[in-house]
Image: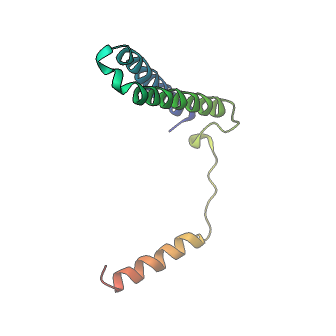
């Protein structure tokens, strides 16, 4: 996924958070739902928090010198990493135990 695609997806997520806030505001004004006002306010605050976090994330991505995975140069791996070796050992011992 490119940086541009990620920013696009985050924009959709931010718009969805705005839609939730809008729906909560509409429902909040209904008299029959007065007993739920506290819960509705908590949901709206969560939506606002999500939107702020997503906006900050988008800003961080757009201001980053990294342009995305497709623009990075690959570094050839000459020797399997320690983690890969450990995974091989672990998966081998699991098969021996009948898992």
In the displayed structure, does residue 2 sit left or right of residue 43? right
Can the viewer see residue 6?
A: yes
Task: Find residue 53 and report its horizontal and vertical position in percent.
Answer: 58, 33
Task: Find residue 63 and report its horizontal and vertical position in percent.
Answer: 69, 31
Question: Closest to the observer: 84 or 11?
Answer: 11
Task: Find residue 38 and report its horizontal and vertical position in percent.
Answer: 43, 28
Task: Find residue 57 and report its horizontal and vertical position in percent.
Answer: 60, 34
Residue in the image at 50% along x and 28% along y: 45
Instruction: Look at the image and name its color scheme.
Output: rainbow
Question: Closest to the observer: 83 or 99?
Answer: 99
Vertical arrangement, residue 80 with respect to residue 4, above or below = below
- Could you tell me which quadrant the C terminus lies in? bottom left
How many numbered discs? 0
Q: Residue furthest front?
A: 35
Question: Closest to the observer: 33 or 49?
Answer: 33
- Quadrant location of residue 52? top right
Can the viewer see residue 80?
A: no
Q: Residue furthest bottom?
A: 96
In the displayed structure, does residue 10 sit left or right of residue 24? right
In the displayed structure, does residue 3 sit left or right of residue 44? right
């Amino acid at each position: 996924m490119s940086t541009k695609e990620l920013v696009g997806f985050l924009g959709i997520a931010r718009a969805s958070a705005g839609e939730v806030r809008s729906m909560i505001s509409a429902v909040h004004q209904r008299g029959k739902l007065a007993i739920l006002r506290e819960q509705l306010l908590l949901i709206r605050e969560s939506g606002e928090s999500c939107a702020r976090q997503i906006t900050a994330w988008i800003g961080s991505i757009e201001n980053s010198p990294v342009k995305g995975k497709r623009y990075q140069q690959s570094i050839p791996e000459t020797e399997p990493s320690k983690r890969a070796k450990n995974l091989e050992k672990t998966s081998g011992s699991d098969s021996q135990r009948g898992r």
